[in-house]
Amino acid sequence: MLPAARAYGLGVIPWGPLNGGVLGGALRKREQGGASRSGSGRAADTLDRHRETIEAYERLWADIGEHPAHVGLAWLLAQDGVTGPIIGPRTAEQLDGSLRALEITLDDDILARLDGLFPAPAPNGAKPAPEAYAW
């Protein structure tokens, strides 16, 4: 929806940008036996369906030496039109940690790698925004 919002000059406030913990290091936590919200429900289904992509994402943030949730939030904040995510931390530690995303600058190479891992779908064929996003 970001292309349509940009075309109309609207800001976007995304809710749940880490997809229930999927982009917060869920596979690593699962392998280490740690409990997480991503172990069941929609997040678990997403992990199962997109395991290779999530593994590549986890390798990327490990390569750049940042926490996965911070990379995910920094990537979101780098998107033109995003005014600020609704993050929903469960602890004060998670809230404090999320602020790290404001300090991370992802270079063009990292942004391109992230966009390659999670490409935007081409809705309604390949029409330009905002027509491509019309119902």
Image: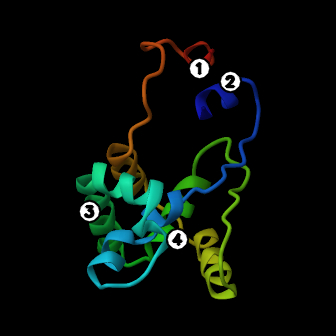
Disc 4 or disc 3, which is closer to the eye?
3
Nearer the N terminus, badge 4 or badge 1? 4
| Residue 133: image tag | 1
Label 4 residue SS: helix
Disc 2 or disc 1, which is closer to the eye?
1
Nearer the N terminus, badge 4 or badge 3? 3
Q: Which amino acid type is marked by label 1?
A: Tyr
Residue 98, image quadrant: bottom right
The alpha-carbon separation of the residues under discs 1 and 3 comes to 30 Å
The alpha-carbon separation of the residues under discs 2 and 4 comes to 28 Å
Residue designated by label 3:
55
Label 2 residue SS: helix
Residue designated by label 4:
70
* Whether residue 50 is visible: no
* Other residues around mark 2 within 10 Å, as few (<14) / some (14–19) / many (≥20): few
* Mark 3–mark 2 CB contact (< 8 Å): no
> Extreme left residue here?
52
* Other residues around mark 4 within 10 Å, as few (<14) / some (14–19) / many (≥20): many
The C terminus lies in quadrant = top right
The alpha-carbon separation of the residues under discs 4 and 3 comes to 16 Å
| Residue 112: image tag | none
Residue designated by label 2:
7
Q: Which amino acid type is marked by label 3?
A: Glu
